[in-house]
Amino acid sequence: MNKLFIDIETLPADENSQSKLEYLFKRQLEKKSRKKDVVEEVEIEGKIADKFEDYFLKTSFDGGFGRVLCVAYAINDENTQVICNPEDESKTLQEFWLITEKSDLFIGHNIMNFDLTFLYQRSIVLNIKPSKDLSFARYRSSPIFDTMCEWSKWGFQKNVGLEHIALALGLPTPKDGIDGSEVYDFFKRGKVKEICDYCMRDVETTRQIYKRMTFET
C-alpha cells in the first residue's frame, strides 16, 4: 500500500476575483441589514473596507476563490518534498494529481474537511481533472486517514490542532517561527521558502503522529 502524507498552504483570492468578492460581500451585508439584530449601520465610512478586508482574508479557506500556494508531501518513508509554483497554481495542482496516481491511502491532519476538499474545489475551478475520485465517506480510515478525526474517533473533541497532538505525544512542534495564520503575511514579504519549509514540517509531524496512532513505532 502506497501512503501519501500531505499538507497544503493557501492564500486569499487574487486581484482578478476582487469585483466578484465585492459583489458577494455586499450581498452578505444586504442580508444582514434585513435582520433585526444589526446594531450599527454598515455605511459608516471606513467600516465597510475593514469588514471587506476580513472577508477577503477568509477566502484562503474557500476553495472557490482562495489559492493553493504549495503542497508538501511524503510517500511512505521517503523524504518530504514540496510542490510550489507561486505564479502558476494550475501547475501545482497538475503536479500534485500526477503524484497521487499510485497512492492508495491519503494521510493528513484535517484533510477531510480542508486540504483535500480545497484541492478538489480548486481543480474544478481551474478545469484540472483529478487523477483520483476519492470517497469522502465519514467514520472510516481509508482511503483517507484524517489524523484529527482519528484522534477523537469522530467524537466530540473536534478541531484538535496538529501541534496539540504532537506535544501530547512528545514530538517537536512543527510551528517553529510560523503558523498558518501568518502564511499570507510571509507571502507578501516574499518568504515563500519559509512557508514551504513550514508546510513540509507539518507533513513530517503528521507522519510521526500517524505511526504513533497506528502503533508502527
Image: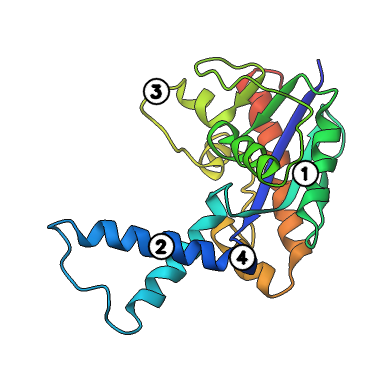
Q: Residue at x 80, y 57 (%)?
A: 88
Q: CA distance from mark 1 to mark 3?
A: 32 Å
SS at mark 2? helix
| Pick the front one: 89 or 2 | 89
Q: Earlier in the sequence, mark 4 or mark 2?
A: 2
Q: Height in image: 113 above or below 36?
A: above
Residue carrying label 1: 93
Looking at the rendered structure, the number of numbered marks drawn on it comes to: 4
Residues marked 4 and 3 touching at CB (< 8 Å): no
Is 156 left, or right, of 44 in this rendering? right
Residue 163 in view here = yes
Residue carrying label 3: 155
Q: CA distance from mark 4 to mark 2?
A: 21 Å
SS at mark 4? helix
Quarter residue 122 falls in: top right
| Pick the front one: 166 or 51 | 51
Q: Which mark is residue 25?
A: 2
Quarter residue 23 falls in: bottom left
Q: Height in image: 125 above or below 6?
A: below
Q: CA distance from mark 2 to mark 1?
A: 28 Å
Q: Residues within 10 Å of mark 2 (few under 14, many from 20)?
A: some
Is 9 left, or right, of 71 in this rendering? left
Q: Residue at x 73, y 33 (%)?
A: 5
Q: Residue at x 53, y 67 (%)?
A: 19
Which quadrant of the figure contains the N terminus? Answer: top right
Q: Height in image: 49 above or below 85?
A: below
Which quadrant of the figure contains the C terminus? Answer: top right
Please tell me whether mark 1 or mark 3 is closer to you in this view.
Answer: 1
Q: Which mark is residue 184?
A: 4
Q: Residues within 10 Å of mark 1 (few under 14, many from 20)?
A: many
Name the amino acid, label 1.
Leu
